Image: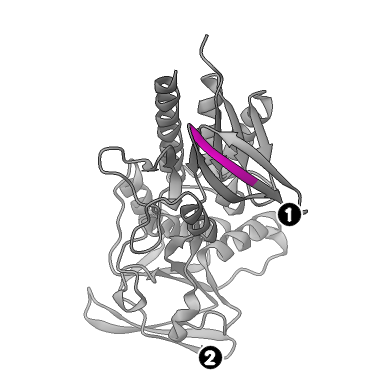
Amino acid sequence: MNEVKTALVIGGGPAGLEAAIKISQAGHKVILVERTDSLGGILLKLYSSFPRWENPEDLVNYLTEQIRNSPLITTMTDTTVTAAKKSARGYQVTLETNGGKSKEIEVGAVIIATGFEIFDASAYGEYGYGIFDNVMNSLEFEGLLKEWAHNKEKISPPQTIAFFKCVGSRDRSKGLPYCSKICCMYTAKQAGLAKELFPQTKCYVFYMDYRAAGREYEEFVRSVIEQKHVRYVRGRPAKVIPEHGRLLIRAEDTLMGLPIEVTADMIVLAAAIIPSRGTREMASLFQTKIDQYGFIDYETKQPLKTGDRVFFAGACGFAVETQGAMEQGAAAAAEVLSLFNQDN
């Protein structure tokens, strides 16, 4: 009979949850570590999803139910990995709770699934983030969408909402020349949801171009433009100026070749995806490869491998949508299971 081995999964977002479930279903033990007090990661902050307008909480509930029902998965929330030492067939790892209690464990493989953070948009002083209360980043707007949906009858709808794409992404002057990949889609989703909640609200999306390369993605964006009547303006805003409690946006419509001014009640910034603090910490502890921006790097012949008996999944490697994160979680689990089979 094969020996039951133990894997450590760091991060309780969709990638980590899927990895833990798949490893346990193959008959191996999993220790799932999450630094916050709940599982679900970024999904807990989202209102609806693309491209099918589904409720992210339904997915979280589905995944966490499988986690709870598996006798092979030990879940440790409010816990961080504070030390790791290579052993003959894995790692000796120290876990520490927020209460200061520590525990040492022995694991045969590690999957890092520590997610991402949002670029600090205050670097764009001309947009007023951190200065004007009605300028927010995309995650903050998700929370506002939730509030609007739950209290719709009590809300005074905004007249106009403006969305700025590529805030940090594709900007060499800020050190982030890469595309953050998911911003085009979640911006379309957010503008569409605002119009669904408040049909009379005008929504403008300022963009350089939009990228919709996934299954049903192009159709999704077109439906937002054509059916929900969100106006897309090709051009990067130059300046935001406060005006009588609202915000005057000056930009150029590069398709028309004309300057444009829009007065909005609020502005939503699609800020770049950057590596999380946890990603940087785990990369250091497990001596894994990182790229020039701080994302976990991969081995060319094994795309989800990043070190000796260490794998990764999800946005700690680069920006990825929920479905892609789960697919990577399942693939990383398969790598672990292959490794465990070789150990026999």
Q: Which residues are magenta?
A: 89-94
Q: Nearer the viewer, mark 2 or mark 1?
A: 1
The crowding category of the residue bearing disc 1, from other C-alpha atoms within 10 Å (few below 14, some 14 to 19, many at least 20), is few
Residue at (57, 52) in percent of width and height: 46
Asked whether residue 15 is in view, the answer is no
Residue at (37, 40) in percent of width and height: 305
Place of residue 250 in the rendered image (x, y in percent of width and height, measured from the top left)? 38, 85
Q: Nearer the viewer, residue 127 or 257?
A: 127
Identify the coloring: one colour
**Which residue position is annotated with label 1?**
98
Q: In this rendering, would 165 be left or right of 7?
A: left
What is the chief secondary structure element of the magenta stretch?
A: strand
Quarter of the figure with residue 172: bottom left
- Magenta span has 196? no
Asked whether residue 144 is in view, the answer is yes
Q: Nearer the viewer, residue 154 or 58?
A: 58
Place of residue 280 in the rendered image (x, y in percent of width and height, measured from the top left)? 48, 59
**Which residue position is annotated with label 2?**
243
